[in-house]
Each structure stands twice: as structure tokens, then as C-alpha cells.
Amino acid sequence: MVKAKKRRATFALYKTEFRLQRKSSIWWLGVLGVLMIITLLMYPLVDMMMGVIPEDVLEQMEQAGMSFEFGGVTSYLLMQGVQTLALGGSLFLCCFSANTIMRDFKGKQSELLYTNALSRSDIVLTKYSSCLTMTAVFNVFMLIIELVCMCIIDIDGVQIVPILALFLYSIVLNLILVNITLALYLLKRKGGYGIAIAVPLVLYFLGAIAYAVSMQVPFLSYLTPFTPFYDITADAPFDANLYPFIIYAVIAVGLFIWGINKFNKRDFA
């Protein structure tokens, strides 16, 4: 009987998370979806512009590590996906996860929520599961948009395996950053969206810098989970450097466990 009540309370909290954030989530998903559509629709124009650049200039760009030779819509998506999918998705999902915690400390709701029969760990893990669900929803939503647009633009250039690699890398990155963001809010308790915005932005710009100077300072590529996105190619989609994912996954899990433990000891009365 007690377990049944606990399951009903957990499921009710899970549904509440989506109901309270439904409108903002639809707006976020819509905006990022439109950005992805615009990005893909620009491919014919960008490809045409690259075709008029002299070969000697292209060679100089390649020597400087700035090759923009797409060779098809899939290669173009792999190059542009780090902005819309990796950065845009992470910003949305980190803000979503932050709001699940921030909202409980407005109007003294925490006194009611975190002092009832449902344990704090159960509440946090239920909120966490809602973030995982939204991560999956976002990536599936974007995958469908990508495939539809790419088939319209250049169906012969669609390569499923590299697209799936980008999809999987995006999910892993989103989960890592969501874990880190939630953990930091559990540790801090109060604050706005600053952490949720700073976490993906700082790591993204660190990734851009690491990519630009990777030949001179190789170790920088291990300091950001965005690194694998720069290594995806149509010919070898799964040959990316995955060590940054592993490093940050360990950091994310450790922070999350520390955050829950500290959260459980906090006085909300």
C-alpha cells in the first residue's frame, strides 16, 4: 500500500514537471527546430559560394585547419551541428533542468515539497528523470527535422550512420551537461539561470579554442566534452576522441552524488 502511494506520488510529480514547463519547452523546441531548418536550407547557397573560391585559397584554408569543403549535405550537417544541436540543445536542457530545482524555492514551496512523506532523493531523482525524458524528446525532435530537411535538399547526400553518430553524441553531451547543471543547483540551492547558461557556453568556447589550437596544444581537447563533435566525419563517424566524454561523465556523476548527499542534509523548515 505504501509503495503504491509512493509510485502514484512520484508519477504525479513527474507529470507536474512537464505540465509546469510545457509552454516554455514548446517555445524552446520550436525556436531550435526553426534554427536547424534555416541552417540546412542554407546548404545549397553556402555550397555554391564555396564553389567560387579559388583553389589556392582553399588550400591555404585547409593548411590553417579551416577546411569548408562539405562534399554533401551530411558533411555540412556534421560541421554545423555543434552550434545548433550541441550548444543550442545543451542551453535549452540545462535551463530546463535548472528550473526544476529553482522553481521549488519560490514562494516557500520547498517547505511543503521537501518536508512531506516522499524522500528528497525520490523527488530529485524524479525531477532528474523528467530531464532525461526531455533530453530524449529534444534529440528525437531534432533528428526528425534533420532527416526531413536533408531529404528535401539532397536525398542522395544523406548518410544515415554519420547522422546517427551526431545524434548519439548529442544525447551523451546533453546528459553530461544536465547532470553537471543539476548537481551545481543542488549544491548551491539558490540562483537564477546563470549557471545553466554558463556551463554549456564556457565549455563550448573552450572547445572552439581547443579545436583552433589542437595541433599546438593537444591536451586542451580533453578539457571540454564538445571535442568529439569536431572529430565526426562522414567517412569515420565513430572514430572521434571519446575520452572527454568519459572524463566529464565521471565528473558529472561525482558532482551529482555529492549534490544529492548535501541536498538531503539541508534544512528546509
Image (cartoon, rainbow, N blue to C red):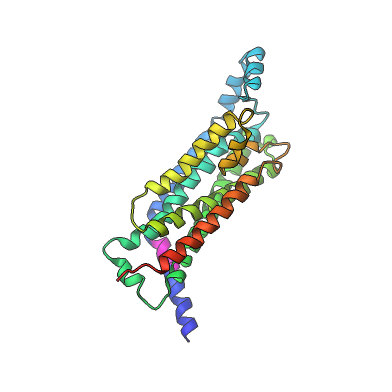
Q: Is residue 226 above or below residue 255?
A: above
Left or right placement of residue 75 versus residue 4 in this view: right
Q: Residue furthest left?
A: 107
Q: Magenta residues, as a range?
A: 14-19
Q: Which of the 4 quarters of the picture holds residue 13?
A: bottom left
Q: Quadrant of the C terminus?
A: bottom left
| Viewer-closest of 181 and 31 | 181
Task: Reply yes or no: does residue 18 show up in magenta.
Answer: yes
Residue drawn 32% across the image and 69% down it: 268
Q: Is residue 182 shown above or below 123? A: above
The extreme bottom residue here reads 1
Question: Does residue 34 appear in this view?
Answer: no
How far across and down, in percent of the image, does residue 116 sit? 36, 76
Q: Residue 6, image x and y in percent?
A: 46, 78
Is 5 situated left or right of 213 in this image? left
**114 part of magenta stretch:** no
**Quick check: 211 above or below 86?**
above
* Residue at position x 31%, y 61% in the image: 105
